[in-house]
Amino acid sequence: MNEYLQVIFGLFGGLAVFLYGMNLMSDSLQKAAGERMKAVLGAMTRNPVLGVISGALVTAVLQSSSATTVMAIGFVSAGLMSLPQAISIIFGANIGTTMTAQLIAFKISDYIYPIIFLGFIIGFIAKKEKTKYIGNTIFSFGLLFLGIETMGNVMKPLASSPLFVSMIERVADIPVLGLLVGMCMTLVVQSSSATIAVLQNFAAQALPGTTTSIIGLAGAIPVLLGDNIGTTITAVLASLGQSRNAKRTAAAHCLFNISGSLIFIWFVKPYAHLIQMISPKGPEIEVISRQIANAHTGFNLTMTIVWTILIGLMVKIVMKIIPLTEAEKAQSLGPKYLDDSIIHQPALALHLVCKEVIHCSEIAKDMLQSLAGLSADKTAALVASLQEKLAQEEGLSSRINEYVSSIFSAGTLTEKQSSQATGALFVLNDIDRIALNSSRLGQELADSEDAGGSMRFSQEAIEEIKTASGSAQEMYERLIHSLVEGQPISDEQLAEDRLKVLTQTDSLRDDHMKRVARGECDARKTASYNNMVTSLNRIGNSCINIADFSNKRMDFSALLTEPEDRKESDA
């Protein structure tokens, strides 16, 4: 057979064994630890740094950045994870995937067949399913290195070919060409780990009569950068047909790798020198595989640190690249979490109801924050904003009530779940009142203007209303935090809040009458002022109602925790 044909067949055969071993190992690891890894992803995303750590950890364990990426895209598409959380996981996955290159850099040629045999025996004789998966993982780990060894052996004749050496020198001298080669290889093979393994093995071939690598580290780095760009196609394919946020997550993955490659391509030689300084010393063909692995890790680690700091900018960029459509803008005003397909799974349905109630509470919080920014010369803008948010909150509340009615109609609720559903609506009802009274307060302020648009209240009166609104906002935010975190407000705090509401509203009315007596406020506006004070009083009372109810009758935070039936259905 033609020598070059033997090389091609050997290369593709070795690559096939490597890919099979990689996929089998990833699949076995996911079956052995996949659910735990999902739990890690779900739990460790409270801030970008934890998201990066969880993404790196899961990818290092599963040996598949694609699996982690697909999980993150699935979570964000289902609304179980925010866009910044998913993006931070993608950043971590880029670090975790470098573990494969680090493993490949170990010289374990003498132990390949014992590893394969050990894995086969464990998988063959094991009775427990998890033990079989462990055996399959060891077996596939051996296959992975068998593929690498096969590729390395068939590449040796290439190093003595003048034509091939001339082509490689051209690629090594033109970094952009190397980047394109690496990108095309990964786009075809669909695995950056595989193409980096090929690169490591190829770079370990020596020029005839020397211990110098056929391509060298400076020539290998552009190909490595191209591999990182090519791997983004997996995320793009996974996001097809998914939500807008899923597509944005894939776009962030692309932006991460493309931006990094375009920056590093200008500093190939200094970067190669840095990697050589921190890597093991020795003949180039003996250490270059580790140098390439270190360059891969260094690239991803550096870009992760940079983009984690700039994660807010990344979110803005991908939002700009993939903006909301008009239909999605309209939909964004509606429910975020309710899903009609799980009406017959009451525990999960109630979980979504409570998440939607908290969504409603955020709108009411925005309205209270608007009141805290009261200004006598901006009443029109204030009222327009409050009315828009009230309409959104009322529409959302109506949809939640319909959804809960559907859950009751399905006839699958236990007595405890029925009580929980009723409790959620009780909380929602008081949130509705807070939103309504916030809007009424703003409207009363606008109605108090005279025909010329001048406010007939003194600046002191406006400031008092702002102060009282700020107190109501503090009370409300403390209440929502206690609901979400499951930390009941103490009886002493509730009593203090009750007293504060009563004292503050009485004080507001007394102060207003004193200003009227001094001629500082228009007496004809007393009814409007009293209505505003009444609205504030009702907001305070609604807060206390919710706190009372959640303290004595319902653990709202327990329903916000993902129920067991969701975990079972995911399995």
Image: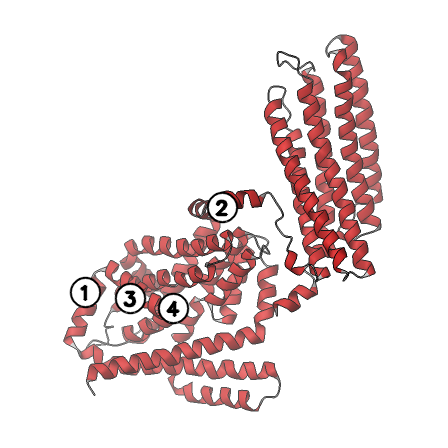
What residue is shown with label 1?
A: 170
Mark 2 residue type:
Gly
The answer to whether the residues at label 2 and label 3 have Cβ atoms under 8 Å apart is: no
Q: Would residue 224 appear left or right of 472 to someone viewing this image?
A: left
In three-dimensional space, the C-alpha distance between marks 4 and 1, rounded to whole angstroms, equals 25 Å
Query: Looking at the image, is mark 2 or mark 3 nearer the viewer?
Result: 2
Return the x and y of residue 535 as percentages of the image width and height: 76, 29
Looking at the image, is mark 2 or mark 3 earlier in the sequence? 3
What's the distance in space between the residues labelled 2 and 1, CA to CA?
A: 40 Å
Residue at numbered disc 4: 190
- Can you say whether 209 is above or below 482 in the image? below
Residue 209 in view here: no
Seen at 38% across and 66% down, the residue is 294
Question: Reading the chain from its start, which is encountered first: label 4 or label 3?
Answer: 4
Estimate the x, y position of residue 332 in percent, counting from the top left. 57, 45
Q: What residue would you read off at disc 2?
A: 312
Residue 220: assigned label:
3
The quadrant where residue 348 appears:
bottom right
Label 2: how many Cα within 10 Å (few below 14, some 14–19, many 20+):
few
Quadrant containing the N terminus is bottom left
Residue at figure coordinates x 66%, y 29% from the top left: 371
Q: Residue at x 77, y 25 (%)?
A: 533
Can you tell which of label 2 and label 4 is closer to the viewer? 4
Q: Tag 1's secondary structure?
A: helix
Q: Which mark is residue 75?
A: none
